[in-house]
Structures are given as C-alpha cells and as structure tokens.
Image: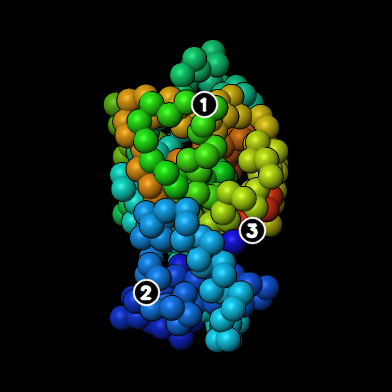
Amino acid sequence: MQFVTFTSSMAPPSGGEAPRLGVITGETVRDLAAIDPTLPRDMLGLIEAGPEVLDVVRSMVAAADTAGIPLSEVQLLAPMLRTPKGIIGIGLNYRAHVDESARTMQTPQEMPTHPVIFIKPDTAIIGPDAAIVKPAATQMLDYEAELGVIIGRGGRNIAQADALGHVFGYTIINDVSARDMRHGGQWCFSKGQDSFCPMGPCIVTADEIADPHDLDVWCAVSGEIRQNSNTRHMIFNIPQLIAHISSGMTLQAGDVIATGTPEGVGISYTPPRFMQPGDWVEMRVQGIGTLRNPVVA
C-alpha cells in the first residue's frame, strides 16, 4: 500500500484544515477517516498500531463504498509529520560519494568502517511541492537524493538477520545541506535547518518493495540530471544500518533512516552547481514515486 498525508488542495497554505491519512488507489486517495473514524488519524499512530492494522486497512479500503478523492484535488504533505527522534541521517554511504566528498569537502578518503550518523529535526521536514528555503547566510545549498527507511517494529540490539522484519516501508528524502555552514566540522546545523528535509510523496509498505537494495535513485535540478545511481552501491546496507544504530540507541516505531546519497551532489561539479532560488528539484526512487520541491530565497 501507498500511504499519504494530505489536505484539500483548496485549503490555504498555512491552513486550518487538519492533515488526513490516506491510501493511494490508482489516481485517487482514499481518506481512512471517512472509511472508518476509529482508524489511526496520522502516520505515526498507524505505524505504532502494529502490523495487524495493515490487514485491517487493506480489507476496509477494498470493501469501502466511499469514493476516492482525485489526486489532483489534494495537497500531499510529508507522509511523516512527526517522528520519535527526528530523521536519522547516514553520511558517506555510497563509495563514489565518499570519493567526491574527499575531493571537495575534505572528508576522509578511506571508506568508513562504521556508519556516519547525524540527526535532522522534525522542524526540517516538508512535503511535496513545499519550498526549500535558501538561507541568506549560505552560498552552497546542496541536494542529496536518498532512500528513506521507516521503522515499523522498534527494538534494541536488532540482529542483521532480523532487521528487514522491523521495516514498515520506504519513502524518498532530500537531505538538503548548506555546505558552508558546517560549524566545527559538525553536520547537524548545516543539514537540520527549517525546510532542509523534503520527504514523500508517500510511504510504500515494505511488502511492495521486493529488494530495497536494487532501486534506482535519480535527481534532477531544473531539468538537468545530477544523480543517477542504485541502492546496490550502498557501503552499509539497510540491515547493517539498523543493527548498528540499534546497538546504541533504541529504535522506535516511526523512526526514519535516511540511508545516504550517491555521487553527483552539487559541490562535486566543476564549477559547483548548487541549488538557487527559482530551481525545481526533482527526485525519484524506483517503486516509490517522485518528490518535487521549488527553491526560494
């Protein structure tokens, strides 16, 4: 299933309309609250309700006699508006990106021996078509197309062999980065600012992704293709990431892991090609869809 969080496209941008939880069927969205008001009202509540609720939702959607809402009549928001601990970001997780980062950002040339972890706060999250805001203080606003992993069943010290069983689903994340705002060598501020985590357009449940380690990842800025790779090139795969993170911090239902970006980020070009106000950034991950966001000053 493809879960979305949405409002009416007629609602004002700052609006008073409460976000709703839905399932995409064809070219429509089925409003879960309209099908059964006892169902969870947001994505985190749905995930926390456990895997059994998916079978209930699937049956209810199939049997419902309420009409779907055309996708053209809704505004998709980030599928996860709140998470237990923010977005767990993974840096330097594609071999070619390690090489280009060492050349352009003075990061180590050696392949990392452990996942490089940072956190982006919930306040950075925006949805499809929402604006990435370029701070006046940065001249190096960069994009990073990434596969996002949503934890369904939490735990501590999760074994690699069991890790994929803890995954609820997958989404697309743009790990926006202000390269010249890495204060003290740390990434949190440069990657965690407001609007720096576009997410969406949906969460695809894990049962619909046959192999998360064989998905094409693609990014274009204003129509120019910048990134074109595949998740098979990750240094640390998803079970390894889940096992490592959970060895030190308890993963909770609804936690989101951004698994790292492949080569082709803006700073890697000569001259660099950073995002500018007026650009549109488009990202695709095979089997999930397309995430598009404008850039504004």
Q: Are marks 1 and 3 in contact (CB under 8 Å)?
A: no
Q: Earlier in the sequence, mark 1 or mark 3?
A: 1
Relative to 114, does residue 61 appear above or below in the rendering? below
Residue identifier under label 2: 38
Residue in the picture at 69% in, 50% down:
286
Quarter residue 272 falls in: top right
Return the residue at label 3. 289
Residue 276 screen position, x and y as percent: 51, 54
- Secondary element at image label 2: loop
Q: Nearer the viewer, mark 1 or mark 2?
A: 2
Disc sitting over residue 6 in the figure: none
Question: What distance separates the C-alpha of mark 2 from that of mark 3?
Answer: 29 Å
Left or right, 173 with reference to 13: right
The three-letter code of the residue at mark 1 reads: Gln
The residue beneath circle 1 is 160
Q: Is residue 185 above or below residue 219?
A: above
Name the foreground residue: 280 vs 121.
121
